[in-house]
Image (spheres, rainbow, N blue to C red):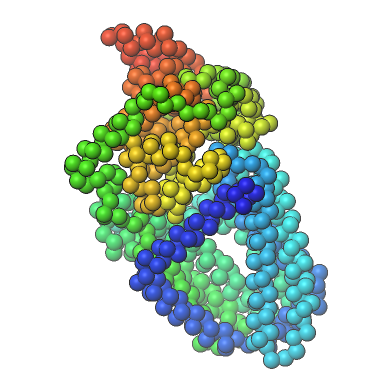
Amino acid sequence: MAAYFHPRLQETRRVAGNRLRRLARQWPQTLFHLVAGSALLALVGYGVLHIDGDRIGLVLRLLAEQPLMIVVAFAAFGFAMCRNATLDLLQELHLGWWGAAPVPPEATRRSLHLHALLQTALGNLIVFLVLAGVVVLSRHDASWFLPLLVAASVGFWLGSGLGYLVVRRLGQQRRDKLVQQQVSTPLVKLAVLDHPQLPHLADWQRRETLRRWRSGGRNWQFLLLGLLFPTGLLPWQMIGLLLLCIALIWYGLALRSSEDVLVRATRLFAALPLPFPRFAAGTLRYPLFAWICASLLGAAGLLLQSAKPVIALGFAAALGLGSLLSLCLSWRYRHRPRHRAHPRDGRSADPAAGRLSTAAACAAARPRAGRTALPRCPESRLMPALEIAGLVHAYGTHRVLEGVDLRLQPGEFAALIGPNGSGKTTLLRCLAGILQPQQGRIAIAGADMRSDTLAAKQRLGFAVDPTLLPNLLTGRQCLELFAGARELGGIPASTLELAEALAFTRWLDHEVLAYSLGTRQKLGILLGLIGEPPLIVLDEPMNGLDPLSAFALKQHLVRLTREHGCAVLLATHALEVAERFISRCVLLLGGRLVQDWDTPALDAIRHDPDTSLEQVMVEALQRFGAPRTD
């Protein structure tokens, strides 16, 4: 399966296994969730048993007499479901932590096929179970079941196929168009929801709900409701059904948005002396307001359909119980798990053991005589490691890169420097194949990134952004997945040695969720350096690293350039790093490379006691008229 499908399927399988193991370790919480879930299901079952199945069966029989309307309605449902699910997966594969991985396009295409097929089959199964449940509740003739199921299935599969084709066509366009920015300004301000000590937190939740509403394609649900409204219902019954559906659709979106904001607010306020009761009160106001509105709308809808008051009360109670359980889980798991037995910096708590580990790390980072690794592509070492010609990239009408030209030879250690907003990160993402430039050519060790993407990515090592790492995988599992994508047959010994030098070995078997920023940075670097490809690209790799780990990484990069012939392109603001270790330095300003210091020029700067690379860079920025950012 690893060669035929995208490694994302293996990631899903390993995440599921980790979830099961975590549930087994945290058995008291698991038991509590099972009891609470059972109580909720019992309440829902009690309400279902009191539903008038004969009346629902009559409505469905009327619908079965209009098969064309059913086909169109379920086609809209299948189109929206398949399009949204496939688009989310496509964004993850192209823009997430797999963006720079050397995965064959055929494997990605097959994985999208399989994902869309499973989503459609699951949706069709849900439709079947709902209709079968109505048959069980109804005591009258169920001759409508088979015609309605056939019409719904045909429409569902047709709509899903169309939604998949739309996403495939979108995926063939430039990848940065996959990200769509949506306006999320509420129409009416509700200052009464603001907590006195946490103002605007409820407004944050409302904005997130509105953003999801506008970007998630909820219009198909209203279209489906309009198509499914039977003509035989009385006007107030139609209004009641509409109110009930609006309440369920909107409240589900509001609750999910509130949970996400709760987790993000926890990280934002982590350094503040904020008591949990105050935080809980601040984050509960908007969900409570949403529950009240949804309960009133739903109860009104049920009463307009001649339902008993106890059914309306049961609807509000079930909605509130499910919401409270969901919020409690979010409050409970808003923090990452603590591993008290292992210090956060990854080193032993014993001072003697710490000194031994530090010495071993420095020894592992030093170049060793007689130890040279054979490159996997010997012919690629005989050509330039990187060739960039006329690279142009823009976000909409804003041009970020303006005709960048750069060439790196094997064994060069180059630093890419420049002020904020000069285009460094955009340039590196174009090199990695995550973004597709409008003009220009990029070749990695002779392989063109546009026409031979797989070969180019096999010769490129790109450090993964720490914020994109999957939280529910361990460091070892991440390394194994990337080693499998590069067809290495397992984690290379050189990668494990670098992990030891970076004091990361202790964290290999812990989930990424428990990592600090520096530990995540180490894992991202290890993923980029795995296999020691001809070109290594790093974006601010020293951020979050402790001094010993930063020194070990610098020594390792120098060894790769000198002994293995790898070329390294390092984007950094730490000019002391660039000044001491590199053999070349280029200055990017306004989307153009305006200055290039080769080895003799850098040696002259190093040997001049009255100057430094920082001073030279400032003079170059002033000479080229760089705008001030203060």
Compared to 421, does 519 lie above or below? below
Q: Quadrant of residue 151?
A: bottom right
Q: Residue furthest left?
A: 351
Residue in view at x 61 percent, y 44 percent: 178
Asked whether residue 559 is in view, the answer is yes
Q: Residue furthest front?
A: 370
List x then y, in percent, for residue 322.
Answer: 46, 73
List x then y, in percent, for residue 214.
Answer: 58, 54
Tell me the quadrant of the picture where the C terminus can be found.
top left
Q: Is residue 201 left or right of residue 109?
A: left
Residue in view at x 58 percent, y 78 percent: 301
Q: Residue furthest bottom?
A: 139
Q: State the residue in front, 117 or 564.
A: 564
Residue in view at x 49 percent, y 71 percent: 293
Q: Is residue 505 left or right of residue 399?
A: left
List x then y, in percent, for residue 616.
Answer: 37, 13
Asked whether residue 188 is in view, the answer is no
List x then y, in percent, for residue 620.
Answer: 42, 14
Q: Quadrant of residue 303?
A: bottom right
Q: Is residue 490 left or right of residue 169?
A: left
Q: Is residue 111 left or right of residue 464?
A: right
Q: Quadrant of residue 241?
A: bottom right
Compared to 445, does 505 lie above or below? below
Q: What is the number of callouts on the image?
A: 0
Q: State the residue in front, 276 or 20.
A: 20
Q: State the residue in front, 58 or 246.
A: 58
Residue in view at x 58 percent, y 19 percent: 382
